[in-house]
Amino acid sequence: RRAVERYSAALVEKSNQLYDELMADQVIPEIERESPDALSVQELEQVAARLEEKIEAIDEEIASTTDVAERKRLRAERKVPRRLHKQAADFATRKRRYEGHMATFGTRNSYSKTDRDATFMRMKEDHMKNGQLKPGYNVQIATEGQYTLAYDVYPNPTDMKTLIPFLDEIETFFDLPAHIVADAGYGSQQNYTDILERRGRLPLIPHTMYRKEQKKKWREDPFNIANWAYDDETDTFTCPDGRRLPFSHESHRTDRNGFTRDFRVYECESCDGCPFRELCTKAEPGRHRQVSVNGAWEEQKHMTRTLLSDEKTGALYARRKTDVEPVFGYLKANLGFTRFSVRGKQRVKRELGFALMAVNLRKFIANGIGGSAKKGSGHRKSVTGPLFLLKSSKTG
């Protein structure tokens, strides 16, 4: 996507220069434009058609005269329109191709030419050890008792963007349980807000910094704002050097998905002469340390920490590894299902459905049809329980 955007911007500049040159030399009459910023594909094709008419007119003049000198002059005059016509036609073709690329990208940054629904991702199976990208899909499953209840495939490399559409997909079949359990890859403010406010459920999902926040180094870092003293009455933070950071202004940031986060920004009264300046901030000389606090996000993180440290809900989260991980383990290690053999999202989804069905049937048979599991088998019966356990995997 980045390359297409760069080449597309350069094309806009070149096509505008071409049009300005045509207007300055009065090679063709002015055309009606939709926007002065960039020529559309149709406008570039119109420019090429006008130039072609100009060339055909010169060709007719050449054919109608027998004067050698005149014919020579007309052929020399024809060179410029020919060159510009070739440029305009090439620009129109390239612009149409770039627009096609952008339409295929959608919200993605890449796609595979052999499977346009697939996105280039970093896979766990990196045999070359060079972090190369391969076209693949992000597989999402919801399990209970090691049985797959729902699944889907997405072109997003990261799990955060797949949780909301996957829960929407699940709700088309049955109601969500009281707790939604997933790993830290799904922990974001947008996902927490959606589960709490829109669905009325509790997320047992650690945020991305949850594990790091448990470490002693994080808790004792003097330059971490979470460890700074805060005065609620004056709405002021105090830095390690004893300098005050009063409230400055509010900030609202909207990401590419349209989700808006609200921040309260605090700024140090003066960082001049601070002995910790190099360790505390990367602000340019003359500017002072600013910190942004997202109150809603901090409350959600506090709620998650409380839930995960609680004995009951913490035990529910602990089940995630032993419930959802074995499904992918058996799918990959025992069935050898590490690659899709078809192309296109719908075909890929059907193939994955057959593979997950095989895993479910195998477990059902291992549990004993109509009876109890074999002693020591370690397999649990399927129960409609209080939670879904979500897991993802990237498969090419």
Image (cartoon, rainbow, N blue to C red):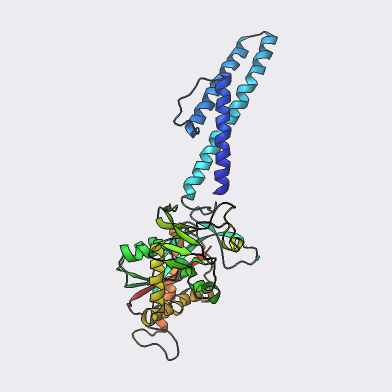
Hey, which residue is sitting farthest bottom in the picture?
A: 375
Residue 165 or residue 230, whichever sits in front = 230
Instruction: Evaluate whether residue 204 shows in this view.
Output: no
**Image coords of residue 193 (percent x, y):** 36, 63
Q: Compared to 101, does 276 lie above or below?
A: below
**Image coords of residue 317 (percent x, y):** 41, 77
Residue 169 or residue 218, whichever sits in front = 218
**Image coords of residue 230 (percent x, y):** 44, 67
> What is the quadrant of residue 94 in the picture?
top right
Residue located at (53% from left, 42% from top): 98
**Image coords of residue 118 (percent x, y):** 50, 56
> What is the quadrant of residue 351 in the picture?
bottom left
Residue located at (61% from left, 60% from top): 132
Instruction: Evaluate whether residue 248 shows in this view.
Output: yes
Q: Compared to 246, does 174 lie above or below?
A: below
Q: Compared to 56, does 364 lie above or below?
A: below
How many badges with numbers are in the image? Answer: 0
